[in-house]
Image: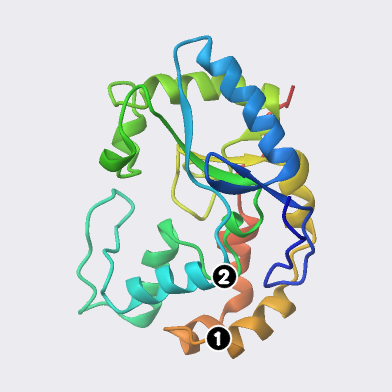
Amino acid sequence: MLTPTTSPYGLVHANFVDYQGHLLERETAKALEQMALAASLDGIKIKVCSGYRDFSKQLKIWNDKALGKRTVLDKDSQPVELTQKSDKEIVELIMLWSALPGTSRHHWGTDIDVYDENGIERSQLQLVSSEYLSSGPCGDLHRWLVKHAGDFGFYFPFQEGLSGVNAEPWHLSYYPVSSDILRAFDVNALEQILNEAELELKTEIMTRIQSLVDEYVFKVAPPPNLG
């Protein structure tokens, strides 16, 4: 058991627990364990490749992408050369796949990235859409999740045309808890945290923080009927 953690925007989470070496919110972990057991009966081995991620780690991901130290992908998962891009364009390109620090759903412990260990090894996984197509190594997993994830309280928040973030067929959210966190999201508290952070592209971000939050935090796919 771990002590409660305060998010960058002021929410106090329930205790986190360890699941497959990743920190998850307690109820999320319980539901995931049940879902993984059900999937295993159909020959699918659900493994987590990303769970809770703290502000500092998300900040490093953001800054590395902004500085060109880490590859930035376009909506088709193709690398983008940033040297000729404006700050506005770079911010929007990064946010297709990577959240602004303090806004990542991975901060909550309710959201996970998953793959099928029976289809691909973790060391080979790239987390690109082609891996989750019907012919991909995680195709069976994705089909199973589309049919059954809602029975356990999970859904895909990032879907084509329904979210500001690009569609991520590997990203699941435990709606019974994440929905409450999203409703309580405090933009003013986020703005204060970012003003104090060593954040690349800060001027561009802070001039339109509300619109970025509206597009990339609040704009997510509606959950299906959950079981």
Q: Quadrant of residue 102?
A: bottom right
> Is 48 above or below relative to 106?
above
Indicate the position of residue 115 as horizontal and vertical percent values: 42, 33
Residues at badges 1 and 2 in contact (C-beta under 8 Å)? Answer: yes
Q: On the rendered image, what quadrant is the C terminus found in?
A: top right
Along the line of sight, the residue nearer the viewer: 36 or 95? 36
Along the line of sight, the residue nearer the viewer: 98 or 118? 118
The residue carrying mark 1 is: 197
Along the line of sight, the residue nearer the viewer: 172 or 74? 172
> Is 32 above or below relative to 209?
above
Task: State the residue at coordinates (65%, 51%).
Answer: 109
The numbered disc on residue 55 is 2
Looking at the picture, which amino acid does disc 1 mark? Answer: Ala
Going by the image, does 76 lie left or right of 151?
Answer: left
Looking at the picture, which amino acid does disc 2 mark? Answer: Phe
The numbered disc on residue 5 is none
Task: State the residue at coordinates (50%, 63%).
Answer: 99
Residue extending farthest to the front is 1
Indicate the position of residue 225 as horizontal and vertical percent values: 72, 26
Query: Earlier along the polypeptide chain: callout 1 or callout 2?
Result: 2
Task: State the residue at coordinates (29%, 35%).
Answer: 130
Q: How is the image coloured?
A: rainbow
Classify mark 2: residues with Cα within 10 Å, few (<14), some (14-19) or many (20+). some
Q: Secondary structure at mark 1?
A: loop
Q: Quadrant of residue 149?
A: top right
> Is 71 above or below relative to 150?
below
Indicate the position of residue 212 as horizontal and vertical percent values: 56, 70
For marks 1 and 2, give the CA distance: 10 Å
Indicate the position of residue 138 as horizontal and vertical percent values: 37, 27
